[in-house]
Image (cartoon, rainbow, N blue to C red):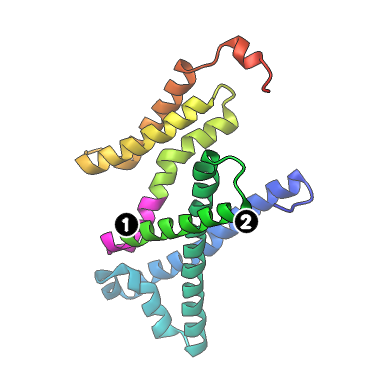
Amino acid sequence: MSAKSERVAQYSSYLGALMYLAIGSLPLLIVLCAQQLYPDLGAGDPSTILPDMVMQHGNLFIQILFFGALLSAIMSTTSGAILAPATVLGENLVKPFFKDISDKKFLLIIRLSVVAVSAIAIAMAFSSQDIYELVASSSVLSLVSLFVPLTAGLYWKRANQAGANLSILLGTAGYIYAELTETTTPPLFVGLLWSIAGMLIGTFFFRKSPAAEAQPAT
């Protein structure tokens, strides 16, 4: 965000993605090696393989460093995952309904949004005991609702607002429908296809007239 040029921002993003991939691969490689060296560990809960390896082969300093970093990552991710949607909820969904709102009232809206998002997150956490399922669900929603409109907005000149909105709605609806009906096709692909269809329908069937597009905004 504070890069001195667009080129620096572009290459720093590539470098950050490469570092993220390299560092994220380390625990995966440790678990793969553990499954080969200790086949009995794979028969139990796979989420405990990495902590078991640290407890068996790491000294006290490594154990403190590992679990401290793990708790730090969980807490920082949790706080960001709550604050980000709460800010979007207050700024983009609630604030437009109020004209000339004061900073004090807007701050109250953001705080109430934080409480609402936290309550929803707690309810979702109690509804499932599988952390992998919860993480997968959060990632899937980004793919079926955000990937298509963001990509089309960047690389497709004919994309419009109606297509983006319809893509988000249909992608989310398609994923939920496939998840509830338990179709043979993975719900991820159903939602992605519905999202693409929504983008195409909104772009081609809800286009503005050439005169409206040429008229400058006031």
Identify the residue at image location x=27%, y=59%: 127
Asked which secondary structure carries label 1, the reply is helix
Q: Position of residue 175 (x, y in %)?
A: 32, 40
Q: Tell me if residue 66 comes above or below residue 124 in the rendering.
A: below
Q: Is 101 placed left or right of 148 in the picture?
A: right
Eye-nearest disc, 2 or 1: 1
Cα separation, mark 2 vs mark 1, equals 27 Å
- In the rendered image, residue 170, in percent from the top left (x then y), is placed at 37, 32
Is the residue under label 1 in contact with that under label 2 (CB below 8 Å)? Answer: no
Q: Give the image location of residue 29, x and y in percent.
A: 45, 66
Query: Closer to the camera, 80 or 55?
Result: 80
The label number, if any, that marks residue 16 in the structure image: 2
For the residue marked with disc 2, what is the amino acid?
Gly
Q: Which of 190/177 is in front?
A: 177
Percent position of residue 58, x then y: 46, 84
Q: Kindly identify the residue that appears in the image at 50 percent across and 64 percent down.
A: 79
Asked if 152 appears above or below 134 in the picture, the reply is above
Q: Quadrant of residue 157?
A: top right
Q: Which residues are magenta?
A: 124-138
Residue at the extreme right: 4
